[in-house]
Image: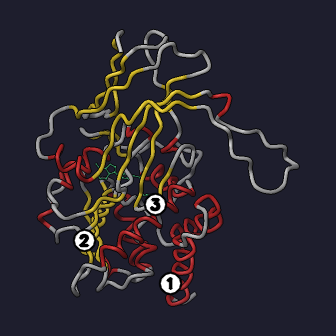
């Protein structure tokens, strides 16, 4: 296959993934083809049956998952499609306000395929977009470099950096217009996106963040109503479940504005909200946290779209009966995440 043909395949796949007419969940074939395409362009190989955590790094700001796990993230169809689509739209919008210079994208946690960046290199020439590819794992940086070089996209790269994004000095490179990072887990637990955003955005006054926002909301859920069972012989659209939920309020939100404010004076915790459990608490309800990832504009990942947005129970030492106030906070450190205290009186 010629270079021209390879790039044309990548461009077609990227255009299909970015097509807003296509539901995210419908892109399984395209995401699989993209994964196979990138995998063939690096010597990095893995066996999903092996110890997939081997090579992970527990940093002082959270877990940097292993190169194998980072590679496997590609298979989360809606996640991967939403981030590629969202980054493409962010690039397009931000490019409109530039006068003749390229847009600078800092990709914090690029993984072994630079999965969110390489597809865009097939759409935008290097005089329109420049990337700094950053990852804490040398295996991932070396692999991402192979992918870029094999497609002759080297002119799209300002630099490859192997290091911790939480300790990256953005002034050593052209000021980023966009900072993209998918270094998160459900409820913003365990992985370092919050700290990465605080550290990088507080140094980059004009940069926008992709994802634009990640928020966690508390609610009461009747789990028996969360899904509708469908007969295997049914045809047509899936019925929309008639869910029974009581929203209690937003508990925590990471976005550019908050990250800049928090990043200017970081301690070991960040403020989060308080919610009150209605009294009496009806027995069918369980208190849960819902994560929503607003990648960019109206491109969102909501409940059950991917592993990042699976509802999680709010566990308490005593069963909730109603009337309690839950005071949340976000704890930074090697195992970051939301924590909460229960007070008897709402
Ligand atoms: C969830 S994977 C995402 C990989 C790829 N960007 C994607 O979207 O498929 C997270 C990546 O971020 C890297 N990472 C996590 N924490 C990091 C940190 N503090 N500094 C630099 N890289 C980090 C990991 O090594 C991993 O490659």
How dense is the environment of label 2, judged by Cα within 10 Å: few (below 14), some, or many (20 and up)? some
- Would you say 152 lies left or right of 96 here? right
Helix, strand or loop at label 3? It is loop
Q: Position of residue 130 (x, y in %)?
A: 28, 76
Q: Looking at the figure, which quarter contains the C terminus?
A: top left
Q: Is residue 89 left or right of residue 5?
A: left
Colour option used: secondary structure
Residue at 62 percent across and 20 percent down: it is 284
Report which residue position mark 3 lands on.
298
- Between residue 221 and residue 214, name the one nearer to us: 221
Q: How far apart are the two marked residues, 2 and 1, measured between alpha carbons?
A: 22 Å
Residue pictured at 32% horizontal, 26% vertical = 274
Where is 89 relative to 70, above or below? below
Tell me which label, 3 or 2, sits earlier in the chain: 2
Residue in the image at 57% along x and 16% along y: 282
On the image, numbered disc 1 is attached to which residue? 7
What is the CA distance from the residue labelled 1 to the residue labelled 3? 29 Å
Secondary structure beneath label 1: helix
Disc assigned to residue 159: 2
Rendered residue at 39%/53% (across/down): 182
Residue 266: x, y in percent? 15, 39
Task: Please tell me which residue lies in front, 154 or 220.
Answer: 220
Residue 161: x %, y % from top left = 25, 63
User: How many residues crowd mark 1 within 10 Å: few (<14), some (14–19), many (20+)?
Assistant: some
Q: Earlier in the sequence, mark 1 or mark 3?
A: 1
Calculate the distance from the C-alpha at mark 3 to the C-alpha at mark 2: 31 Å
Mark 3 nearby-residue class (10 Å; few <14, some 14–19, many ≥20): few
Q: Cβ–Cβ below 8 Å for labels 1 and 3?
A: no
Q: Is mark 1 within 8 Å of ligand 1?
A: no
């Amino acid at each position: 296959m010629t270079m021209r043909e390879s790039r044309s395949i990548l461009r077609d796949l990227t255009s299909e993934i970015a097509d807003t007419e296509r539901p995210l969940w419908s892109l399984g074939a395209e995401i699989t083809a993209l994964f196979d395409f990138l995998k063939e362009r690096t010597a990095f190989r893995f066996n999903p049956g092996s110890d997939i955590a081997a090579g992970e790094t527990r940093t002082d700001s959270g877990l940097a998952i292993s190169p194998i796990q980072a590679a496997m993230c590609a298979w989360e169809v809606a996640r991967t499609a939403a981030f590629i689509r969202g980054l493409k739209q962010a690039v397009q919008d931000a490019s409109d306000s530039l006068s003749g210079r390229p847009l600078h994208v800092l990709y914090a946690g690029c993984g072994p395929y630079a999965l969110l960046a390489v597809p865009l290199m097939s759409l935008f020439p290097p005089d329109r977009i420049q990337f700094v590819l950053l990852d804490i794992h040398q295996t991932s940086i070396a692999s991402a470099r192979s992918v870029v070089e094999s497609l002759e996209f080297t002119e799209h790269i300002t630099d490859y950096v192997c290091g911790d994004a939480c300790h990256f000095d953005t002034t050593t490179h052209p000021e980023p217009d966009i900072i993209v990072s998918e270094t998160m887990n459900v409820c913003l637990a365990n992985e370092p996106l919050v700290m990465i955003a605080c550290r990088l955005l507080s140094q980059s006054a004009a940069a926008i963040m992709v994802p634009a926002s990640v928020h966690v909301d508390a609610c009461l859920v009747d789990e028996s109503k969360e899904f509708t069972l469908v007969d295997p012989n049914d045809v047509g659209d899936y019925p929309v479940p008639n869910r029974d939920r009581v929203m209690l309020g937003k508990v925590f939100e990471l976005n550019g504005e908050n990250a800049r404010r928090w990043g200017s004076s970081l301690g070991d915790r960040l403020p989060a909200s308080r919610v009150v459990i209605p009294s009496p608490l009806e027995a069918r309800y369980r208190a849960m946290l819902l994560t929503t990832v607003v990648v960019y504009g109206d491109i969102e990942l909501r409940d059950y779209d991917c592993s990042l947005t699976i509802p999680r129970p709010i566990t308490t030492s005593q069963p909730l009966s109603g009337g309690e106030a839950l005071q949340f906070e976000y704890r930074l450190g090697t195992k970051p995440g939301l924590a909460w205290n229960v007070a008897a009186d709402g």
